[in-house]
Amino acid sequence: ELKVEQNPLFLSMQEGKNYTIYCNYSTTSDRLYWYRQDPGKSLESLFVLLSNGAVKQEGRLMASLDTKARLSTLHITAAVHDLSATYFCAVATSGTYKYIFGTGTRLKVLA
Amino acid sequence: GAGVSQSPRYKVAKRGQDVALRCDPISGHVSLFWYQQALGQGPEFLTYFQNEAQLDKSGLPSDRFFAERPEGSVSTLKIQRTQQEDSAVYLCASSLRSQRSGGNEQFFGPGTRLTVL
C-alpha cells in the first residue's frame, strides 16, 4: 500500500530564511503534487511533477522530484509571512485512481 | 461560476440522521473526487468518478457512505445513519481529464464541514 510521509510536520522559521520540506513515498509513482492549505480554507494547487528530475518554481517556492529515491522536496527561499500555511504533497500511482496525501507540514513564518 | 462549489458549507446532524452533501465541479471536468479531511490531517480519498461512472469507491469507510454523479456533472455524497466519527470536512475536487491521462491538476471546492452530535 502506498504511504506518503512528510517532514517536518511543523516548521517555524524567521522571515528571510531558507528551508526545505521533504515528501517521501513508498512505492513507484509517476505523479506528485504539492498543495497549500490556509486555515479553514480549501486546497490550492501549487505544483504538478510528472517525471524524474522535474523541477518547478513559482515565486519563493521550488519543487523537485526524484523518482528513484521516491522523494520530492519543496524549497522555500527567503520566507515571508504570507507563506504561512499547511503544505501537502500527494502521490498517485500508475493504473490507480486515488491520490494519497501526506500528513502535511504546518509552516509558520515569523516576522 | 469559475470554481468548484460545495453545499452546504456547514452541516450539523444528530447522530443517526442521514445527510447529503453536494458538489458542483468545474463545467466540462471529466474527473470528480471526494475526500474526507479530519482535523489536522491530510485529505483521505473516498471515491472517484469519471463522468458518471464510479470507477473507485475503495476509500468509502462503510456501506453507510454512498456517492453518485448520475449525469456526469453534479455529485452527491450521502451518509446514512451518521456517527460521531463521521465528523470531518468533506472535500470535492474536479479535474479536466480522466485520472489515467496523467498530470491531472485537481481543483478543490471549499468543503463541507460536517459535525455529528
Image: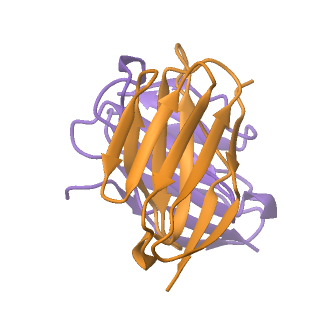
Chain colours: A orange, B purple
Residue B44 visible in the picture: no
Q: Position of residue A17 (x, y in %)?
A: 50, 69
- Give A14 or A35, whichever is nearer the viewer: A14
Q: Position of residue A81 (x, y in %)?
A: 44, 78
At horizontal 66% and vertical 28% (from top left) the residue drawn is B58
Q: Which residue lies most toward the bottom here?
A: A111
Q: Position of residue A62 (x, y in %)?
A: 40, 48
Location of the N terminus of chain A by quadrant is top right
- Give B28 or A40, whichever is nearer the viewer: A40
The mark total stands at 0
At horizontal 51% and vertical 62% (from top left) the residue drawn is A18
Residue B66 versus residue B21 in the image, above or below: above
Residue B40 versus residue A82 in the image, above or below: above
| Residue A86 falls in image quadrant | bottom right
| Residue B102 falls in image quadrant | top left
At horizontal 76% and vertical 39% (from top left) the residue drawn is B62
| Residue B69 falls in image quadrant | top left
Q: Which residue lies most toward the top here?
A: A95
Q: Position of residue A10 (x, y in %)?
A: 69, 65
Residue A2 visible in the picture: yes
Seen in the image, is B78 located left or right of residue A36? right
